[in-house]
Amino acid sequence: MVSKFFTNRYLKIWGTLFAIVLLSEIKIFAQDPIFTQFYSNPVYLNPAFTGSNKCPRIVSNYRNQWPSFSGDFITTSITYDQYVDAFKGGLGIILLSDQIAKTLQSNEASFVYSYHQHVSRKFTLNFGLQGTYIQKSVNRSNLTFGDMIHPRRGFVFSTNDVITAAPVNMFDFSSGLLGYTDNFYIGIAAHHLTEPQVSFISGSGSTSILNTRYTAHMGTEITLGSKSIYTEENESLSPSILFVKQGDYQQLNVGLYYSKGNYVIGAWYREGDSFIVTLGMETKVFRIGYSYDLTTSQLGTYSGGSHELSVALKIYCAPKKKTFRTMSCPSF
């Protein structure tokens, strides 16, 4: 997640503070979940990644953030994408569910298209467009308000504030650009271009704005050339960087992956928030990865860190034309 957003999101566990913020006249700003293994779900990271694999792939991600706290912060997603010759690009579908402290629930369904253009013999440019249907809802039973508090007996009164039980539905659009060669890639993306507004307060002028999320990322693969007559295992390093900004909150991830044969290990640092370790295994048809975020912010050991699991299935397809260029991008 975006670094400064950690504290805000934790505070939402406590119903009173959540209600005060929700009912204030100052506009509040919603944030998106960000996966630690962002390259394991590339289409969610940047719609321009759609169809960048030679064959169809199905990717599933599960993230459990701060399990030591009361309430769950769980994000799950499943993505399908493939390259289609007739469209000269990729088509994809993203399904995502994000649960915040058993109080806020967000469900999304996206359709993605990415056009692929060979600029030169070595450089390819992808342009992605994404349309998303979003539904957000709030569980009123988990909310408490200031007018419910008795000075001595605690929460004994009913609130006069009215929270709508109806989910808020909206449509949204995103776009992305990705350029790559055989061993280098760079991309930018902008999600929530329409900045949709959300309000659960009946008759209130306060709104929650889903700010545009800007993403920039790049990286490369360095072949270590450790092959010998005794082994055919490829060995490489993949350093990369990710920067995300949404409203007043931002996140910077720097790190690298080391791969040898079917096995991968990664080490990352999220600025001001956590150190990350990733372990994975990949074959021609199957990939699985696990990562743990060791929190270094003020939440410290009380949060229990964050656990994330990714699973991918790569479906066999007939070989593509020679003009189709794949990219050496990390999978975890």
Image: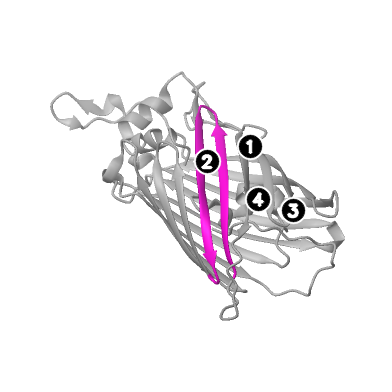
Q: In this view, does 103 lie to the left or right of 154?
A: right
Q: Distance between the residues labelled 2 and 3?
A: 30 Å
Q: In this view, does 3 lie to the left or right of 50?
A: left
Q: Give the range drawn in magenta.
A: 234-262
Q: How far apart are marks 2 and 4 (CA)?
A: 14 Å
Q: In this view, does 232 lie to the left or right of 63?
A: right
Q: Is residue 34 visible?
A: no
Above or below 99: residue 11 = above
Q: How is the image coloured?
A: one colour
Front-lying residue, 7 or 240: 240
Q: Which amino acid does label 4 sit on?
A: Ser
The dot on residue 192 is: 1
Q: How far apart are marks 3 and 4 (CA)?
A: 27 Å
The dot on residue 110 is: 4
Judged from this view, the residue extending furthest toward the front is 229
Q: How crowded is mark 3: few (under 14 residues within 10 Å), some or many (20 or more)?
A: some
Image location of residue 7, percent across then percent down: 37, 34
Q: Which amino acid does label 3 sit on?
A: Thr
The dot on residue 32 is: 2
Q: Is residue 266 left or right of residue 14?
A: right
Above or below 219: residue 214 = above
